[in-house]
Image: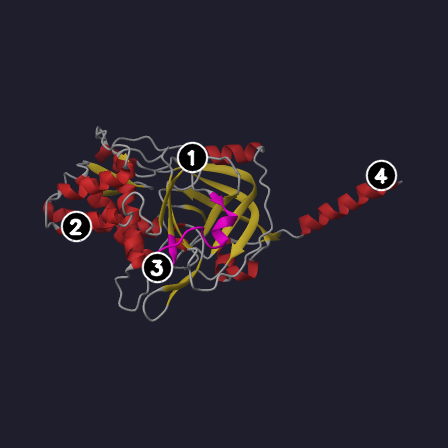
Amino acid sequence: MKRLLTLVCLFAFSCCLHAQVVDTTVCDILKDPQSFNGKIVRIKGTVAAGFDQFVVKGATCGRHVDGIWLSYPEGTKAKAGPAALLQLQPAKNFTGTVAPVERTPVVLDKNNKDFKQFDSWLSTPYKGDGLCLGCRRYTVTATLVGRLDGVTAALKRDKAGKIVAISGFGNMNAYSARLVLQSVSEISSQEIDYSKTASVTKGDVVPETGGSDAVADAHKVAAIFGPGNPLGERIERAAAAFGKQGDNNGVVLSFGAPNQALAKDDAKGGSDSPDGMLFNCQFDTNRLKGNALSIAISYEGTLITDLREPQKADGRVEAYELEYYAWQSAVLAAIGNRLKTMTAPGGYLLWNAAWTVDERTKSVEEGLRGFLASEELLSR
């Protein structure tokens, strides 16, 4: 009898848990992320894992950052995710308020065959000629269940321009919603069409350059432009954001797949910083090697400098503009690395040495704008 009661209680409890799953959409979540905060949700969407992206896309929702950041639970050993990630975190000496965050742990059903296939598809590289930075072969449409973390993504400064509050998820903390994955089902893959650029990059062999220190490589690339060249100075500025070995400048460099929601990121960091903020940069060196890693350093360094020293007088920073300038630096780094071509995820050609001088500015701008709007889901 006691055993029967136990089974009945377990059944009732499981039904209760099932009832707590909220069926919703990407757009409904993005309308009011905070109303879903902490809830277990079920959504259907397309997942993309790009250079600086691991997101769930829905229909066009009309947001400046039009997607939900995706993360695996802490401790998950999986391959899919962004190739590079920059996240801001209050330093140990941060003077603003950091509210304690309690989140219900999520257990991922990682032995499920659908999840294994999901992770495999999203971590399959695109294999084409030339350099395609962080490019994957597939996107995946799936039904996803997980814990939704929702905030108002914001970076607040005082009158002196010092950052006094930060909230948000994913790259640059720009996402107002994050889904920490619990399970996936109903999966299907879509091969990304790179055919438009494949004909241009055909036969382009990427030179094997770069040593064991990617930051030093970025400094060398900057020097290639020659003294006093503003393009080289821009790359040098990005490389300088990482400081020298042993510097305590608030930039934390690490390597590995940046695909997990870590509890420590919700609290103050363990070290001080000159401006009270830590800039945590993580690179997946299985996907970024040689000059690709040097280019990624130029990209991330530009983000760091533009976040620390906003170009706008009012201190406002927008994800679209930050990404635009950072990808411009990536293009300059590709030129400095003497690459013939460079392609962004989705097949957007950002550099082609065969372009005439008159074609270059227009072609780079068209490639960047198309990429940011269609792949990164960013708008002004």
- The residue where tag 2 is placed is 233
Query: Which disc, if any, is residue 275?
Result: 3
- Kind of residue at badge 1: Ser
Q: Nearer the viewer, mark 1 or mark 3?
A: 3
Front label number (2 vs 1):
2
The magenta segment is: 260-278
Q: Quadrant of the C terminus?
A: bottom left
Is residue 352 visible in this depiction of the protein? no
Farthest residue, direction bottom: 159
Relative to 3, 102 lies left or right: left
Q: Return the disc, 1 or 3, that comes first in the chain's sequence.
A: 1
Indicate the position of residue 274 as horizontal and vertical percent values.
34, 57
**Above-or-below relation of 203 to 76:** above
Q: Is residue 204 left or right of residue 146?
A: left
Mark 4 vs 2, N-terminal side: 4
Secondary element under disc 2, as helix, strand or loop, is helix
Query: What residue type is disc 2 on?
Result: Glu
Farthest residue toward the front? 246
Residue tagged by mark 4? 3
